[in-house]
Structures are given as C-alpha cells and as structure tokens.
C-alpha cells in the first residue's frame, strides 16, 4: 500500500490514501461531517467542496487527485473573502429549509462568486445545476445567491 498523501483541509494539514474517495476520507476519517453524502455518484451535489477554490464533488475525487491541493468545506467558508457576504445573504433570504443541501449549495456559490463576483442570473443557475434540493423549490436559494451578488 502506498503512503498517505498530504493535502490541506480548511488550511490544516491532512492526509488521504491514493485510492480513497475524498468524501469517505472527509466524513469517515477526518471528522468533516459538515460535508454531506447523498448519491455518491456525482449527481446530487450534497458533497460539494472547493478544490483550490473551484467547486467539485468530493464523491468523485480519489486521494491521488487531492494530493498537494487545498480543500475547503463549509467549515472553512468564513475564512474565504466571499464567505461572510454569502452566509449573511442566505440567512437573510431564509434560503434553506431542511438544510441538507446547504453545505453543497453554499460551496458551489462560493466557488462561483470567487471566480466571478458579478455573475448574471443564468450563470448563478448554471453554477447550481449540479446541486439538488428536495424541499425549497430553489427560489429562496436563487434569491439568496442574487442577494450575495448584489
Ligand atoms: Fe457526491 Fe451526490 S454525494 S454528488
């Protein structure tokens, strides 16, 4: 078995096995249960985290793809330049109901706003098209995203 590979998790050192999925490492070994597990096949977006600032599905990444990279979960959102604005906007708009999709939605939006601070509505919708929500109907989430942008 190859030695564990180093990466950073919310700015702190962490390790992962080359063939382990990032989602399993985060939830089962590293205590990052704020990252939610849903489909485990890249369809629901519940597991979305940032990989060097870009939104990715943790269930689709293997350890070798994470080596040397920076992973940010919702627990690290406040440290991002867009973090406070995004969190305040989602709270102001009561964006979420049950909240299970919230960590993934928030990280998709954090990745978008970091790359494009003024996305149009179509770009916001595109950034969230991989994130499923079973209870809000999406309107409140989209409102929150627009508030964060504006
Ligand atoms: Fe990763 Fe659904 S758990 S996309």
Image (cartoon, grey):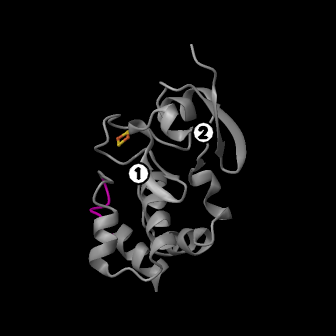
Q: Position of residue 120 (x, y in %)?
A: 33, 82
**Residue 30 in view of the camera:** no
Seen in the picture, residue 46 relative to 125 is either above or below; the reply is above
Q: Quick check: which quadrant has ligand 1?
A: top left
Q: Nearer the viewer, residue 10 or 92?
A: 10
Tell me the distance, in whole angstroms, between the alpha carbons under discs 2 and 1. 15 Å
Residue labelled with disc 2 = 32
Give the crowd class for mark 1: few <14, some 14-19, many >=20 residues within 10 Å: many
Q: Position of residue 134 (x, y in %)?
A: 29, 51
Q: State how many labels appear.
A: 2
Secondary structure under tag 1 reads loop
Residue lying furthest right: 12
> Which circle, 2 or 1, is nearer the viewer?
2
> What predominant SS class does the magenta segment belong to?
loop
Residue labelled with disc 1 = 101
**Residue 51 in view of the camera:** yes
Seen in the picture, residue 85 relative to 28 is either above or below; the reply is below
Q: Which residue does the image show at 43% across and 60% down from the upper left?
A: 108
65 displayed left or right of 124: right
């Amino acid at each position: 078995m190859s030695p564990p590979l180093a990466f950073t998790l919310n700015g702190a050192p962490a390790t992962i096995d080359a063939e382990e999925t990032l989602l399993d490492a985060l939830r089962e070994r590293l205590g990052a249960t704020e990252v939610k597990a849903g489909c485990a096949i890249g369809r629901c977006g519940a597991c979305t985290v940032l990989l060097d600032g870009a939104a990715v599905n943790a269930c689709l990444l293997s350890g070798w793809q994470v080596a040397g990279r920076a992973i940010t979960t919702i627990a690290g959102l406040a440290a991002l330049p867009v973090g406070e604005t995004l969190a305040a906007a989602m709270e102001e708009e009561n964006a979420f109901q049950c909240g299970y999709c919230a960590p993934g939605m928030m990280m998709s939006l954090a990745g978008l706003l970091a790359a494009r601070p003024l996305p149009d509505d179509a770009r916001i919708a595109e950034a969230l098209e991989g994130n499923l929500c079973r209870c809000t109907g999406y309107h409140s989430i989209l409102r929150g995203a627009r508030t964060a942008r504006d």
